[in-house]
Amino acid sequence: MVQRTDIRPTVTGVPGVGRVLVVIPTYNEADNVAAIVGRVRAAAPQVEVLVADDNSPDGTGAIAEDLARADRRVHVLHREGKQGLGAAYLAGFGWARRRGFDAVVEMDADGSHAPEDLPALLAAAAHADVVIGSRWTRGARVVNWPLRRLLLSRCGNLYARLALGMPVADATGGYRVYRSTVLDALDLDSVCSQGYSFQVELSRLAHRAGARIVEVPITFAERERGDSKMSPLIVAEALWRITGWAVRDRRGAMRRGWRAATAGQARWP
C-alpha cells in the first residue's frame, strides 16, 4: 500500500467536533470522484477529504491526485488493489488516527450520500460518539431505488436489529461519523467483514462498547453513473455474519447468566 506523505492536514476544524476527515473509498469511480469531492468541499469547507483508491483501472486514482494538487485539503491513499469496502475504510481510519483527526466520516463515492447532508451529521456529532445518516428514520427519503432494493434493505435492517438487539434503524447505512475516541476504543483489528456486514459489525462493536449512537435522516439516491458494487455475495455475507454474531452473543449471555446463578448458589447459607 502506497500513501502520500508530502501534504499535512491543516489545523482548523468543525466547532464542537474538531478536525474531520471524510474518507471516500473508490474503485472505478472516474465518472464520480471529482464531482463528489467538489460537493463535499462546498458543503463543508472546514473538513478534509481522503480518497482511498483501490488501484482503479479506469484512472480514478490519477483524477484524485489532480484534485489533491489543486486543494491542500484533499488527500489520496493509493491501495494495491481491490480489497473491499471494509478494508478501505479501516485503512482510512488508520490514516486519520495517525494524523490526529478528531472524527472520521464514511461516504460513498457514487453520490448516493448527499454531501449537502454532511453539516447536519457533523452538528449531531458534537453531542454523540457515532452518527449514522439514516435512510429509515423519520424525515429520511430514498430516491430512485427499485422495490427489490428497498425490501432488501428494510428486511436486512430489521433482521440485524432484532438478531443483535441494537436500537439502530439503519445498521447497514454507510454514511457515518465516528469520533476518534470511539475508534480508539474498538478492536478494529478483529474486523474482517465487508459491504453491508462491515457497517453492521461496526454498529455492533460501538453499541457493545457503550457508544452513544444517534441517527440523522438523510436523502439517499441511487447512483446515476457507474456500476453498483452490490452483489449476491455481499448480501449472503451479511446474513451469515449477522446470524453468527447473534448466536455468539446469546451464548455469551447464557454463560454469564449461568455463572451469576451458580455464584449466587455458592453464597447461599
Image (spheres, helix red, strand yellow):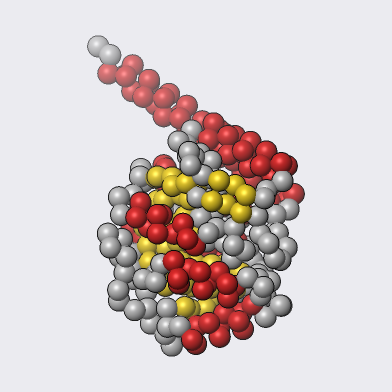
Task: Indicate whether 106 appears above or below 82.
Answer: above
Q: Quadrant of residue 230?
A: bottom right
The location of residue 28, given as percent across then percent down, is 68, 71
The residue positioned 42% from the left and 63% from the top of the image is: 104
The residue positioned 59% from the left and 34% from the top of the image is: 159
- Outermost residue toward the left? 269
In front here: 259 or 19? 19
Task: Indicate whether 141 appears above or below 109.
Answer: above
- Give the number of marks: 0
In the image, 133: left or right of 198?
left
The location of residue 219, given as percent across then percent down, is 54, 51
Quadrant in the picture for the C terminus: top left
In front here: 79 or 129? 129
The location of residue 192, given as percent across then percent down, is 57, 55
In front here: 209 or 120? 120
Task: Indicate whether 19 appears above or below 114.
Answer: below
The residue positioned 67% from the left and 80% from the top of the image is: 59
The location of residue 92, given as percent across then percent down, is 49, 68
In front here: 213 or 227? 227
Q: Quadrant of residue 158?
A: top right
The residue positioned 43% from the left and 45% from the top of the image is: 215
